[in-house]
Amino acid sequence: MTNSIGEIIDADAIFITGSNTTESHPVIGAKVKQAINRGAKLIVADPREIELAKDADVFLQIKPGTSIALSNGMAHVILEEGIEDKEYIKANTEEFDKFAKKVKDYTPEKVAEICGVAAEDIRKAARIYGEASKASILYCMGITQHHNGTETVMSLSNLALMTGNLGKESTGLNPLRGQNNVQGACDMGALPNVLTGYQSVVNPEVIEKFEKAWNVKLSSKPGLTIPEAMHGASHGDIKMLYIFGENPMVSDPDTNHVRKALSKTFLVVQDIFLTETAELADVVLPAASFAEKEGTFVNTERRVQRVRKAVEAPGEAKPDWVILMELMNVLGYGKKYHNTEEIFNEIREVTPQYAGITYERIAEVGIQWPCPTEDHPGTKVLHVGKPARGAGLFKAVDYIPSSEENKEEYPYILTTGRNLYQYHTTTMTGKTDGINEKAGECYIEINPSLAEALNIKEGEIVKVTSPRGEIKTKARVSEIVGEKVVFIPFHYAEGANILTNGEELDQYVKIPGLKVTGVNIEKLA
Amino acid sequence: MITLKINGLEVEAEEGSTILEAATKVGVKIPTFCHDPRLVPHGSCRICVVELEGGRNLPTACTTPVAEGMNIQTESKEVVETRREILDLILANHPLDCLTCEKSGRCTLQDLCFKYDVKETTHRGAKKCHPIDESNPFYYSDQNKCILCGKCVYVCSQLQGTNAIGFAERGFPTHIATPFNEGLAHSTCVSCGNCVSVCPVGALMPKSKEKFRYWETRTVRTTCSYCGVGCQMDLVVKENSVVGIDPVMAVPNDGLLCVKGKFAFNFINHPNRLKKPLVRKEGKLVEATWEEAYQVIADQINEIKTKDGADAIAGFSSARALTEENYLMQKLMRAVVGTNNVDHCARL
């Protein structure tokens, strides 16, 4: 997030898109509701009529994958009505003219057709966002998990830049990160192209710095992302996969392809349970849970927070850091750490954003990076004064439909997401009876008119197919989804990801287009 | 700033703050049932009454703003007598089943009755007889124990924004209920448990798998391991088991949690946890020692590196694990294995 969770309640307008906030980030959802109670205006754009849609001043039930068109349409209206922040654009941005020219084509009427919403609602949303003095955008995987996810984010960034909603409290571009430490994992360079603190592996100075710090030779060839490594494994190029705390047999697209890939490689899985992925492994290593170790997680607002040990790990299970260190030692790298604080201090030495954060300083309240020195308070809002890169770069981007759309054989669009009760692949939440009582099995949401056309009744088992495979699941007939759109939560094994496409990736960051899958639905005889 | 006296002590307080806030600031404890700093003060329980010199009656500390020159007594004879009468009235309709009540040891009513020596009620009359609402899988509502402080209702409406519960009926039968008394399972309740976390008595209680007394437990401050909000929470620990979770009044969650953070902790002590390394032998995963497991992995890495190069190995790190562990995973892959093939589930 460019801004902080606590700032949400003081926003004048909140634009939520591709985030089912009250179910996926319930406490942020509660803050949004507090903001509404204080008078904030709310715009929701989502293919599903999520809970917050009922509180929205404008709800745009867009067709999945059409967010770029919507952003461009809103930008068109903002310019047409002259409510852009001319001063901010002039002082702090680049390539505005190119962008302005691009969005000229995206008239509300044209966009209304693409998105399947009313032109007047696009105008209304644009006015609310454009006229607010503090407007915050909250988004999640409904924006990013597309074949053009990066450009979809850029289209939202254009809106923030053109209205000057950046670098001030209660504004900004705020991705809600889905997992407890996805921010920390990214910050630590658990990414194929960067080391810690987003230091690029292709920068010779960076490589030299880390070679010195770690006393080894390092590769400057960018590595493979998960979808690419999975692809490599299925083609025999990747001979070994070491997976920890992750269950791709449920969470990754195209389960049959994942199974094939994992079966072909030497597979090591390190986890707290024998997950669907661990069942395929050649070696399984038992790990400690979060309640059994000391350390830190970094939340969605970049706040480094403490994790503390409450109980002993069961049996011979060990904290992941101990396992990784011991394996390094067996492989001949002799470095020993006695606790996670020692590791954290090493991180501080090589990561400028973390240099000022110490375990002592975050004992009570976490600190938000960047925090370059020990007397720095941490950073609540990014891009204050000027965007970090100097000038905010407008990106003229076009709406391009996914190749999953408009296939005769697969006429309906499947989109995926979470429900309130389960978390990711149910490995943890599924161990609580009450959670399973509320959301124990997979289902598909189908609009009543589609259900009627296909003669499907509530609770019936239906067959859902895509080019990747088929599943049988229970129908939930509900107006929450539009007529030609269906929704399946991705929590369950033998569920949504049997159907999704693992091949069509975003060109910049290789994210799969999980939110748009062409499917067919049949009533079982 | 406003200057006033609390128990003879000169105190400075901000204009617009309440007597309760001024007292808390200087470490003077005034008992409360219904007060919560996050809520609009509603002064419904009256237990925070204090004596104000020159005042007509005893004002409630939680709703009365400070004024210049106020002279406040928080434990005077009259205050104590009034608090005893309030407790006496509450007890007139509260079961005295502390022997078996799960809230015992963490019950504000129990603590205040102890403090003010109120052993039983002097009022006799009808007793509440509400059925216990057990329809929610995570917590139950026993309205016979409710003291109608209203905190649950206001947390649900003002902070959680769900409006699942409210006051039903008036006078003696008043109780907290879902619309049309249909039960929690049939309401808009999202099982966040934020009402349970603020209940000062045993009216809203988690359904615990394990029997425990609060005095057998300790708490450990940590960060929730589910979504990216990073809620601060206290794990309630008995021996080697996590038996409950409380939200912490701090950034970023300000005392709120969701159903997963509050109630979905059974995985920690679950019998199916992995307890030993497993190595596949003749097609089956069988238990092995750590040394053996490490050696099998190291042999594979060395063999593949020699034959196909380090780039034929890839590691998936974990957005679920510690920052420090993610650092070590990428260090293992880069510095020891020798490849940048390291990624994690950020895209999924």
Image (cartoon, coloured by chain):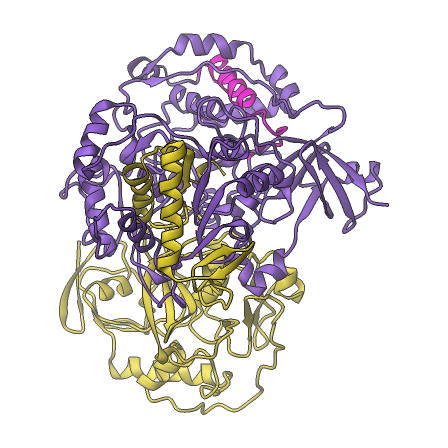
Chain colours: A purple, B yellow
The N terminus of chain A: image quadrant: top left
Residue A189 in the image: state x and y as whole percent: 32, 36
Tell me where the magenta segment starts and ends, as one range: A57-82
Q: Which of B109/A416 is in front?
A: A416
Q: Which of A481/B150 is in front?
A: A481
Residue B29 in the image: state x and y as whole percent: 25, 72
Q: Is residue A383 left or right of residue A436?
A: left
Q: Residue B309, relative to residue B330: is it above or below?
A: above
In the image, farthest residue toward the right: A525
Q: Is residue A516 left or right of residue B335?
A: right
Residue A300 appearing in the image:
no
Identified at 37% across, 88% down, the residue is B118
Q: Is residue B202 left or right of residue B190?
A: left
Identified at 40% across, 64% down, the residue is B246
Q: Residue B136, relative to residue A477: is it above or below?
A: below
Residue B301 in the image: state x and y as whole percent: 38, 42
Q: Which of B224/A524 is in front?
A: A524
Is A64 inside the magenta-drawn segment?
A: yes
Is B20 inside the magenta-drawn segment?
A: no
Residue B256 in the image: state x and y as whole percent: 42, 56
The C terminus of chain A: image quadrant: top right
Residue A13 appearing in the image:
yes
